[in-house]
Image: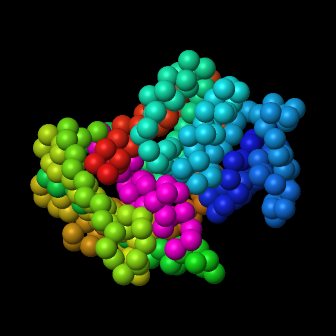
Amino acid sequence: MNILIIGLGSIGRKHINAIKSLNNHSSIYALRSNSNGENEPGVENIYDLNESIVNFDFAIIANPTHLHYEFIEKLTHKNISLIIEKPALSSLKDVNRLVDLIEKKQVTTYVACNLRFHPCILFLKNKLKTEKLRINELNVYCGSYLPDWRPGKDFRKIYSANSSMGGGVHLDLFHELDYTTWLFGLPNKSQSLFRNVSSLEIDAVDYANYILHYDNFTAHITLNYYRRKPKREIEIVFDNEIWTVDLIKNVIKNDSDEYLFEAPDFNIMDSYVSQIEYFTSCLKKNEMPMNSFKDSMANLKICLDNE
């Protein structure tokens, strides 16, 4: 397969490593803005999309979020299937025009939310599908320390810290909203609160809170950039017990401290590999992937409507 990468940052390189690990003899190309950039082993640089003679099987859009719209539009016009790194966009402006274009050109799209391939999330997905579980409350929490994200770089200069570049914890940690609605469905109603008043002193949102209203329970999602000891957990309050899902330790326990599920050998890079396998399988079978661009807009509206 011929695969095009847009954006050679940390996420773009994770996708490249996932492709290489599959040993499927794919040819990987990267669209570069100039020839001064550092070369990536096993990746061929191209500098003008219009002059390229390569027929791409699909492209991965992994550049800063505020640039996504431009490249989704360009590649859709070229009928190239797309993996779009989450979140698909940083603004809802002209989103319907893009949805219409993708549908008109019948381009296959998948918004990359790799935590859907986390074994704990997959365990929950299966449990909720096969068992009738009465939920009273759901609490989702993800907090980490932004200055630790990219060691050696001034955290205030990376896109995460800058709202003009599509940064903000509500966009960076879009996974939590995505897997919540994937597991439990879209809410009947939502409320949100975004702030940036922490000691980080950045202009992007560094705290976000969602309240999602479901028929029989309420879900709370809390996100932040300033927690020094990372925590990524889901707490599900059932009628008779409470489950805690630790997405860092890859375990699920109940309130009696009993292990319900564990995946000790799982590494987060495994989810990127599974994601590429899933998408390429959809292409080969001519099947529509889950979480298309249009599908993902429902969550993006929850995320951005109240900004």
Q: Is residue 257 left or right of residue 304?
A: left
Please tell me which residue lies in front, 127 or 91: 91
Report the span colored magenta.
Answer: 156-185
Vertical position of residue 280 compared to residue 161: above or below: above
Asked whether residue 2 is drawn in magenta, I would say no
Task: Answer whether residue 27 is visible to the viewer in this image.
Answer: yes
Vertical position of residue 286 compared to residue 212: above or below: above
Vertical position of residue 30 compared to residue 289: above or below: below
Coloring applied to the structure: rainbow
Asked whether residue 162 is drawn in magenta, I would say yes
Please tell me which residue lies in front, 14 or 103: 103
Image quadrant in which you'd find residue 208: bottom left
Q: How far across and down, in percent of the image, does residue 20 sit?
A: 76, 53
Q: Is residue 60 left or right of residue 208?
A: right
Q: Residue at x 77, y 34 (%)?
A: 56
Image quadrant in which you'd find residue 64: bottom right
Q: How far across and down, in percent of the image, does residue 304 sit?
A: 35, 47
Q: Residue at x 58, y 78 (%)?
A: 154
Image quadrant in which you'd find residue 61: top right
| Main SS class of the magenta portion in the image | helix
Tell me the quarter of the image containing the N terminus. top right
Q: Residue at x 77, y 47 (%)?
A: 31
Please tell me which residue lies in front, 137 or 208: 208
Q: How many labels were placed on the picture?
A: 0
Q: Residue at x 62, y 51 (%)?
A: 62
